[in-house]
């Protein structure tokens, strides 16, 4: 009998909640939703990070994933996304590798430059610099997780000197990493450049499916250039 691959299902859980709702109960409902998805056989759930919008309650997807992993058994849980300019890449890499061990390989790292300019404003980050910062951080995180040698990097916003992770990843060779893409070429280009997956958030927007073909072409072109 031939084996037929089944379609995979997942959810992108943006941290949206009604204004005026009890935040404790709203977070509990999010946990219960992930538990239900696990029982229904969903393959993955991606949990977002925001800081300045009152209806987006999840500030740390890593903390949420750690709790959700204890309530579930099979579903993979990803940061959707960790906004890389907001974090030192070494610290984020360490937290994700710890989650990789705690979840026995069910954690995934989704990254992006940060969606809300109001988040960047509070942190003193120029929005025009966010995509460049994302690229620099992602390169460093992957170097740490793949750990061919100690990692030294110096930019205008972070520095690492002979850095090595406290733990090697549980997943071999590393956890699944994906880059968010809406309409700008930055996400697709980074995914192709570093051999990562894509969270194609823009595909569900008006005109998104039309743009998707061109977006994938950007990723393929970046991947080809990276191999040269």
Image (cartoon, rainbow, N blue to C red):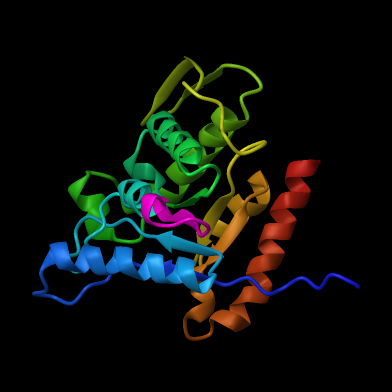
**Residue at (50% x, 74% y) in the render:** 40
Residue 149 in magenta?
no
**Number of marks in picture:** 0
Residue 56 showing in the rendered view: no
- The answer to whether 121 is drawn above or below residue 101 in the figure is below
Report the magenta residues as a range. 69-82
Q: Position of residue 55 (x, y in %)?
A: 19, 69
| Left or right relative to 2: residue 207 | left
Task: Using the image as rendered, state which of residue 121 and residue 163 is in the foreground.
Answer: 163
* Residue furthest right as drawn: 1
- The answer to whether 97 is drawn above or below residue 33 in the figure is above
Residue 222 showing in the rendered view: yes
Task: Using the image as rendered, state which of residue 218 and residue 69 is in the foreground.
Answer: 69
Task: Using the image as rendered, state which of residue 115 and residue 109 is in the foreground.
Answer: 109
- The answer to whether 67 is drawn above or below residue 31 in the figure is above
Task: Using the image as rendered, state which of residue 61 and residue 8 is in the foreground.
Answer: 8
Q: Position of residue 222 (x, y in %)?
A: 69, 52
**Residue at (31% x, 46% y) in the render:** 63
| Left or right relative to 183: residue 16 | left
| Image quadrant containing the C terminus | top right
| Image quadrant containing the N terminus | bottom right
**Residue at (24% x, 54% y) in the render:** 119
Q: Position of residue 5 (x, y in %)?
A: 77, 70
**Residue at (54% x, 70% y) in the render:** 41
| Left or right relative to 24: residue 99 | right
- The answer to whether 162 is drawn above or below residue 2 in the figure is above
Find residue 12 and report its image quarter: bottom left
* Residue furthest bottom as drawn: 206
């Amino acid at each position: 009998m031939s084996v037929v691959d089944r379609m995979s299902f997942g959810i992108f859980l943006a941290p949206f909640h009604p204004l005026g709702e009890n935040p404790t109960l709203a977070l509990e409902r999010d946990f219960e939703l992930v538990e239900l998805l696990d029982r229904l056989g969903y393959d993955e759930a991606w949990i977002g990070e925001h800081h300045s919008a009152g209806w987006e309650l999840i500030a740390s997807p890593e903390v949420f994933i750690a709790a959700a992993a204890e309530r579930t058994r099979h579903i993979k849980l990803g940061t959707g996304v960790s906004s890389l300019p907001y974090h030192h890449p070494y610290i984020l890499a360490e937290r994700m590798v710890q989650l990789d061990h705690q979840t026995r390989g069910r954690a995934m790292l989704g990254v992006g430059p940060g969606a809300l300019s109001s988040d960047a404003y509070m942190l003193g980050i120029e929005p025009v610099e966010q995509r460049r910062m994302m690229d620099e951080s992602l390169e460093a995180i992957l170097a740490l997780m793949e750990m061919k040698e100690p990692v030294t990097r110096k930019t205008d916003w972070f520095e690492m000197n002979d850095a090595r992770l406290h733990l090697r990843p549980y997943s071999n060779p590393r956890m699944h990493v994906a880059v968010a893409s809406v309409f700008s070429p930055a996400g697709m280009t980074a995914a192709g450049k570093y051999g990562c997956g894509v969270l194609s958030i823009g595909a569900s927007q008006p005109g998104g499916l039309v743009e998707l073909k061109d977006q994938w072409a950007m990723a393929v072109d970046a991947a080809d250039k990276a191999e040269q």
